[in-house]
Image: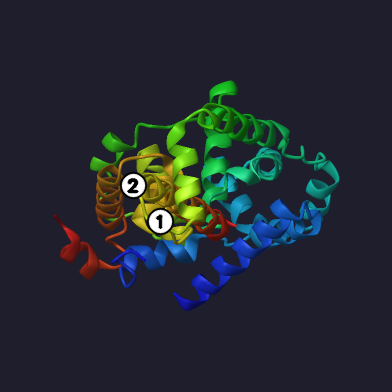
Amino acid sequence: MADGDAEARIDRALVARARVGDDPRAFEQLLRRHQGMVRAQLRRLLRGDIAAADDLAQETFLLAWRKLDQFRGEARFSTWLYRIAYACFLQARRKRSWADDDDGDEAAEHVPAAMPAVDLQMDVERAMQRLSAAEQTVLLHCVQLGLSHDETSYVLAMPLGTVKSHATRGKAKLNAMLAAWHPRAGEEKTP
Amino acid sequence: MNPHDDDPIDALLRAQFDGPVPDDGFSKRVMQALPPRRRRVDWPVRAGIAAAVLTCWASLQSAPVLHEGWSAWASGRLTASAMALLLAIAGMSLLALWWSVAEGGEA
């Protein structure tokens, strides 16, 4: 947590330098510090479409540069960037037509109890794809990107209660689907 | 952090996540595409402040309370108008202080 606070302080100092001193090198440091996770977030949201994710990541940072005056420090800089990236993703999705498989709710209910255990990674990936889009998005931000529920709620512009219920439901479904890999966890988590 | 740090599902999901993407020239490309930042235009604020000060001065110039307060204050008498003048100055100073602290904190 202390590391996170120190990182946040460094970000705030760099933002102040970029904003007040109009210093592009400070912004470049911010870019280098955060590009990896923003691009990872967008790659996940775009289901591995690397080129489109990088285009959106570039758009995200250009927007951040233009809107730097609007960053008031209420959230961490990284969280603010995730929010811009998610907004860019939503806007792009409205314009283009990426597959938005939102049929996971029903699919998850009828998953076979024991999946063919070819590879755990692949099974986790497949299980994730069976979740609803909202559950996938919430779990991506809450678990994989390491944001708190509050931060996820801020990034996705979603009520906190909805974030929590998507996270709980998504995990319960994953637990059921991946019970073959850890039977004890599957038994414990059954609601 | 979330209260599920030791959750096996969390561990599986984290293990499945590839983590940060290596830069591979991305930052350089973005920096080259960066437009010059529009400098904040501050003349409207300055003009507004000047207009407000002039309007205040013009409207208070004919007010007797200001003259009375000023002359009482200058002669060391604590009359009602001098108190009103002092309170107004103190209030404006406090507002200016609060604004400076708030702006400084955000920067």
Chain letter belonging to callout 2: B
Pointer 1: what residue?
B77
Q: Is residue B21 visible?
A: no
Give the image's coloring scheme: rainbow
Judging from the image, what secondary structure is the residue with disc 1 in?
loop
Query: Hey, which quadrant is residue A13 in on the image?
Result: bottom right
* Residue A46 screen position, x and y as percent: 56, 40
For image coordinates 76% across by 55% down, the residue present is A21
Pointer 2: what residue?
B80
Query: Residue pushed farthest left?
Result: A191
Q: How many marks?
A: 2
Query: Hey, which quadrant is residue A175 in on the image?
Result: bottom left
For image coordinates 50% across by 39% down, the residue present is B67
Q: Quadrant of the N terminus of chain B?
A: bottom left
Q: In front: B90, or B66?
A: B66
Chain letter belonging to callout 1: B
Q: Is residue A167 visible?
A: yes
**What residue type is disc 2 on?**
Ala
Q: CA distance from mark 1 to mark 2?
A: 10 Å
